[in-house]
Structure formats: structure tokens, C-alpha cells
Amino acid sequence: MLSARNRELFGLLPVALTVAAGFAAVLIAAEAEVNDLTLTYGLAFLVLCLLGHIFIRLRLPNADPYIFPLTALLAGIGIVTVYRIDPELAREQAQWFVLALVVFAATVVVVRDLSVLERYRYTIAAGAFVLLLLPRLTGGIVNGAYLQVNLGPLSFQPTELAKLAVVVFVAAYLAETREILVTQERRFLGVSFPPPGYFGPMIAIWAVAMVMLVFIRDLGSAVMFFGGFLALLYVATGRLSYVVLGLGMFVLGFAFFSETVGHVQSRVDIWQHPLDPALYDMAGGSYQIAQGMFTMSDGGVLGSGFGQSLLSVGGTQILPAAQTDSIYALFTGETGLVGAIGLLLIYLLFIQRGMKTAIIARDAFSKLLAVGLTAVFALQVFVIVGGVTTVIPLTGVTLPFVSYGGSSVVANFILVALLLIISNKARSEEMTGGVV
């Protein structure tokens, strides 16, 4: 039977071949010559992944063997898809991938003991709040939402890092108070409520979600933050009533602000009527959603093929934000229903390994941290895919590892590093001898 690290190594080989085949398909669609350079792309990607694998083999020998190959596969799909849109953007994305690997390694080296994160939870929470307010203070508007901080030629989206900080804080808080939340709960009309003295964090997280909804105009991150908190609360207490209470708070807050705040109402109107001529304008209207729907439907079952979707005509964008918000629509249009389902299955496998890590974790904080990280990752996928497919209003959240954007790639590699640290610790404490 292959060891965990050898399984990881062999999992990276088909990933490299997939990346090389993807570049070849893009070049063929563009009627460019497919030469040795195509294989070089795949080889360079494989070398970078092998360096990451060697580092994991040395520092985290017992970590989950599938999380890193799945991460590499998603990142490879992202680079190929962005290359199809704009080769220059793809080169930048590849540079961010290299930086993300460096940050990944640094996280593993620095966070040797997860108890450090647990001990400084309030400092981390304060940092998360500052990160969330920075875009509003600096005026970094992206597609109508305050998401970006500009520092000269550089820009980043602090919500990507803030989501990790919030998860660390909530996991640490619930690891300490979960027994009290269960043993000292109050019942009213047959419904269980947390003890009043420990109800504060739920109110605080709800308030943060509402602040994001109103002042930052970021519905996607609000859903991601509050949804991750409810997942952690349910795992920590086992009380479904707490989740129902939290969902009720969020729905009531959203309903109120959708009626009283203009930009929230416009988002809802666009979501409900994407083909309404009165809303179908290119500046902040339903144009992006409608064009995404047309692109996906054009792909059919097997897709139109790489490079076949029409992105612009005469400098006018046919599919706005194809490299970020609409990348799933583009990928679906060119790979069809089969490709769209395949991409979602990769995400589901990643989520399954994250939850598996939570199951085998021994201590409460590690278990809750793994659940929280996996939950916000899953919710981020849901928010952007749901927005593109009109299940929920479209927001500016990126599709993890696939959408163009350095902040997202770096933050999600930190997420992967933390999951592997938890996994390595749990497996090192108890080696079962079976395939996990």
C-alpha cells in the first residue's frame, strides 16, 4: 500500500498533464502552434507542485494526501482558464501562485502550534474587523461593493484574509464555551437559547454581517461569514435551534435592509428579474448576469470548446468580469454541463477531505477550526456559483483558486496550510494503518 505522501505525489502527475492539455487546447482554439512551450507550461507547473510536495513531505509527513493535489488541480484549471481570457493575466496569476506557495510554506513554519492562534483570538478578531473596514475607508469599490484596498500599483481584497481570522476567533471562542452553551441554555416556548452572557458573539457576528451588507455592500461575504459561524455553532453545541435562530436573525436583517437600503434592493431586483429591459444596462444592471446565463446555455452538455465563447466585440465586453465574477459561466460555456459538474465535484472532494480532517482531529479547537475553514470555503463556492446561476444575488466573491486574483489565491493557500497542519497533527497522534 502506498504511503500518504506517495499517494500525494502520484496525484500531482495527472494534474500536470491536465494543465499541459488545457494549454494545448487553448492554443489550438486560437489557431496557434502547439510546440514544446506547451509542455513547458505543464512541466513548470509540475515542478512548482513538486516543490510544495517535498516541503509537505519534510514538514507534514502525515498530512492528508489528497488536499494538496486537489488544490493544485483547481489552481491549474484557473491558470488555464485565465490564459484563455488574457495571457498577460495568466502570467500574473502564475506569479501569485508562486507567492501563494511561499506563503503556504511560511504558514506551516510559523504556525507550529495551533494553540498560538487560540491564545490570541481576540487580537485576531480585532484585526479581522479592521480588515473589513479598510475598503470602505479607502474607497476601494469593485462592481459597486467596497472590496478592494489600493496601495499604489498594488491592490488586495482584505475580506479574503478576514474570513480566516473570523473562523479562528469563532473556533477558539466556541472551543472554550461550548459546554456552557449547552449546559446553561434557556428554553422559551420550547426553543433553546444560548445563555444571555454568551449570546454576545452571535450578535457580534450578525452585526458584522449586517455591516458588510450595508456599508461594504458585500452580500456574498456576509453570507460566507455568518454561514460559517452557524456551521461552527451547530458542530460545537449540536443544537439545531441555535442555527434556526441565527438564520432567522440574518433573514430578518436582510429583509429589512433590502427594503430600506437602495443598493441592497437593486441587487435583489436584478437577481429576480435579470432579463427585465428596464434593468438590462451595462453599468451596474443585470447585463452581467444575463450574459452569463446566455454563455452557460450556449455550452450545452459538452461545451463549445476552449476559446469559442465570445468575450468581446470591438472592445465592448460581451461577458463582463470573465476572469473574476463570471469565470464559472465562461468555464461552463466552454466545457458544458459535463465540465461544470466536474469542477463542482473537485470542490466537493476538497470539502470532503476538509471535513474528514475535522472528524479525525483530537482537540476541540482543531476540530472546530477545520470545520470552520471548510465551511467558509464551501460557502464561497456556493455564493459565486449560486450568483452566476441566479440561485442567489450575484456578488463579487471569487471562485477559490480558479478566479483571477492574488488575494484569493494567497488566502486560500493559507487555509490549505492550516488544514494540513491539523491533519498532520491528528494523524501523527493516532496512525490507524488504514487508508483515510
Image (cartoon, helix red, strand yellow):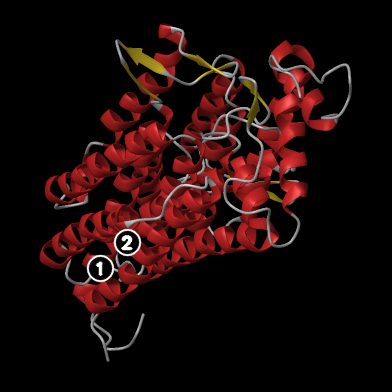
Task: Specify few, some or many for label 1: CA neighbours under 10 Å numbering under 14, 14-19, or 20 or more.
Answer: many
Q: Nearer the viewer, residue 330 or 390?
A: 330
Q: Position of residue 164 (x, y in %)?
A: 37, 40
Q: Nearer the viewer, residue 102 or 242?
A: 102
Q: Is residue 186 above or below residue 143?
A: below
Going by the numbered disc 2, the residue's amino acid type is: Phe
Question: Which residue is at a point 58% across and 63% down the rendered structure image?
Answer: 342
Q: Is residue 411 above or below residue 20?
A: above
Q: Which residue is mark 1?
A: 63
Q: Is residue 390 visible?
A: no
Going by the numbered disc 1, the residue's amino acid type is: Ala
Task: Specify few, some or many for label 2: CA neighbours under 10 Å numbering under 14, 14-19, or 20 or more.
Answer: many
Question: Which residue is at a point 45% across and 62% down the rendered structure image?
Answer: 350
Tell me the quadrant of the picture where the N terminus can be found: bottom left
Label 2 or label 1, whichever comes before in sequence order: 1
Does 353 sit left or right of 381 as displayed? Answer: left
Q: Secondary structure at mark 1?
A: loop
Does 118 sit left or right of 381 as displayed? Answer: left
Disc ID at residue 68? 2
